Image: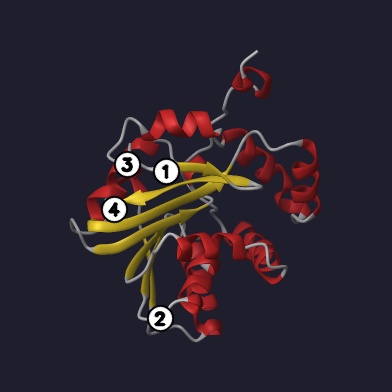
Amino acid sequence: MPLEARLGERVPETDNGQQGEFIAHRYDLMQRHIRDRGWLQEKVDLLVARGLGGVALEVGMGPGYLGLEWLKATRGTSLVGLDISPEMVACAEKNRSEYGLQERATFCLGDAQALPFEDGRFDCVFSYGSLHEWSRPEAVLDEVHRVLKPGGRYCVIDLRRDLDRQALTFMRVNIDVELRAGFMSSVRSSYTLQELRALAGKTALRDAVMSELELGLYLTGTK
C-alpha cells in the first residue's frame, strides 16, 4: 500500500494564518519555547549552510524567531518578513525590538500568493512552517522565484505528514495545550516528500533539492 494511502489523504487548512490576539500570543510563546530549547537551530544552520545571505524575504514569518536568529548568525544581512496575520506582524515587531535588530529587520502584512514586491528584489527567500497553509502553493513558489534575483537562493521548510508516533508524541508534549488541536491539523495538512516533489515539479522551482529533516522536510535551490 502506498505511503500516502496509509497516512490518509492530506486535509488542507485555510490560508488565513494564525489570526487573533489570543492565538498569536500562545503561538509566540510556543515558538519562543522551541527557540529556547535549541530546536530552531537546525533550521538556522540549514539556511546558513545553503548560502542564504544578503537581503532576505521571509514568507509567513509568524512571530519572527527564525529570521531574527538567522540575522544573529549572519553578517551583512537584512530581512523583510511578510505575514497574512496583523497580530503576527505585531508579535514579530515586538520580538525584533527584544533582539535589538530594528535596523536590520522590517515586517509587513501581505499575501504570499501575490507578494507585494517587484521582480528580482531579494538575494534570498525562505519560509518555515507556512507551506501547508497555502491554498495555492504552486502560486507561492512561483512568486518566490519571481522576487528572487538571478542566482538568488531559497529554502522552504515545513512539517511533514508522515511523522512517526514517537515524533508526534514529542511535539505534542512540547506544544501549548491550547494549540495542540491546531498542531495536529497542521500535520494532517502538510506534505510528504513525494507530494512535495510532485508539487514543486509544477512550478518555477522544479529543479529544487528536496529532503527530509527529523521533524519536517524542505526544498532549496538557486534561481
Q: Position of residue 117 (x, y in %)?
A: 23, 59
Residue 204: quarter of image: top left
Amino acid beneath label 4:
Leu
User: Badge 3 local density, few (<14 within 10 Å), some, or many (20+)?
Assistant: many
Mark 1 — residue? Answer: 209
Give the mark nearest the N terminus, 4 or 2: 2
Camera-near label (3 vs 1) is 1
Question: Residue at horizontal 40%, vertical 31%?
Answer: 199
Q: CA distance from mark 4 to mark 1?
A: 23 Å
Q: Earlier in the sequence, mark 4 or mark 1?
A: 4
Q: Position of residue 220 (x, y in %)?
A: 41, 49
How far separated are the C-alphas under marks 4 and 2? 26 Å
Tell me if label 4 and label 1 are in contact, CB under 8 Å: no
Q: At x 69% / y 38%, what residue is drawn?
A: 163
**Image quadrant in which the N terminus is located:** top right
Q: Position of residue 103 (x, y in %)?
A: 38, 85
Compared with 117, 1 (above or below) is above
